Image: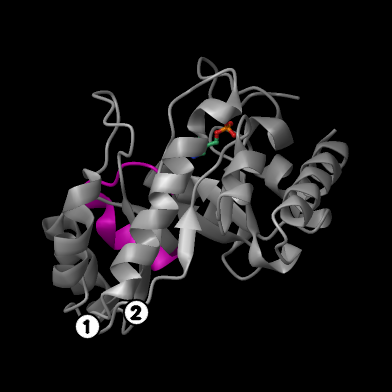
Amino acid sequence: MIRNNLEQVRAQLRLACRRAGRDEDSVTLLAVSKTKPAEMLMEARKCGATEFGENKVQEIVEKAERLGTEDYHFHMIGHLQKNKVKKAVQLSVMIHSVDSLELAQCIDREAEKLSKRQDVLLEVNVAAEDSKFGIRPEEAEPLAREIARLPHVRLRGLMTVAPYTDDPENNRKYFKQMHDLLVDINGKCIDNIRMDVLSMGMSGDYAVAIEEGATHVRVGTAIFGERNYRTKEPKE
Ligand SMILES: *Cc1c(COP(=O)(O)O)cnc(C)c1O
């Protein structure tokens, strides 16, 4: 099942790249494995997946213990609490969900202890949904300027979780807005800010996100199937 799903997602990804006149290598597919057991990550790994998205630090800890972090690159895509930063910095290649200067400073301190420079993205709540984390679009530039001063954090770009919708076309305007925001901030030539990552698009709308410039798409359900939050280790 995972092999077929991955092949289909990759085919759609290639088609979207072609429609947009983009090189398919310009898009990184994150397999969002939250709530799924290590065995399913192993299966995805066999089919060539290397980048995995998780939204809980504890789940990254458990999966990293089991699978290591050499062949499995974990991306922290969920809301991050300060008391979990240490583990997140130890085990993730990228933290997609930075939404305050305090959190960025905390990441900077932990990264310094590990002599690491942590790649991060700013999470933008582009549709201004009450239920979502993330900063407002107009807060992105001032926050980026502050974060650019932190020596052990590398601000790589922007991330958004677009509204849930049955028609991905409804989110096109938000993806466009994110792309414009990234280009706009890059255009100001701020010291230490050259953002090249735009993390947006999920199972329902990743093709549209790619057409609008996503460099990282986060796809869970379309690869691993529906999530079941009631049981701890869903059996397939
Ligand atoms: C769960 C999750 C995804 C994947 O969602 P699907 O609809 O299952 O593809 C992407 N991004 C974030 C931040 C998530 O929490």
The residues bearing labels 1 and 2 have C-alpha atoms spaced at a distance of: 8 Å
Q: Residue 70: x and y, percent?
A: 61, 71
Instruction: Determine the secondary structure under disc 1.
Output: loop
Tell me which segment is drawn in magenta: 77-93
Q: Local crowd at mark 1 within 10 Å, few (<14), some, or many (≥20)?
A: some
- Which residue carries the number 1 mark? 151
Residue 90 among magenta residues:
yes
Instruction: Give 12 or 149, whichever is nearer the viewer.
Output: 12
Q: Residue 42: x and y, percent?
A: 74, 50
Residue lying at 43% horizontally and 27% vertically, measured from the top left = 163
Residue lying at 27% horizontally and 36% vertically, measured from the top left = 133
Image quadrant containing the C terminus: top right
Residue lying at 22% horizontally and 66% vertically, measured from the top left = 144
Q: Local crowd at mark 2 within 10 Å, few (<14), some, or many (≥20)?
A: some
Residue lying at 32% horizontally and 64% vertically, measured from the top left = 184
- Would residue 196 be visible to someone looking at this image? yes
Kind of residue at badge 1: Pro
Q: How many marks?
A: 2
- Would residue 92 be visible to someone looking at this image? no
Q: Are marks 1 and 2 in contact (CB under 8 Å)?
A: yes
Disc sitting over residue 117 in the figure: 2
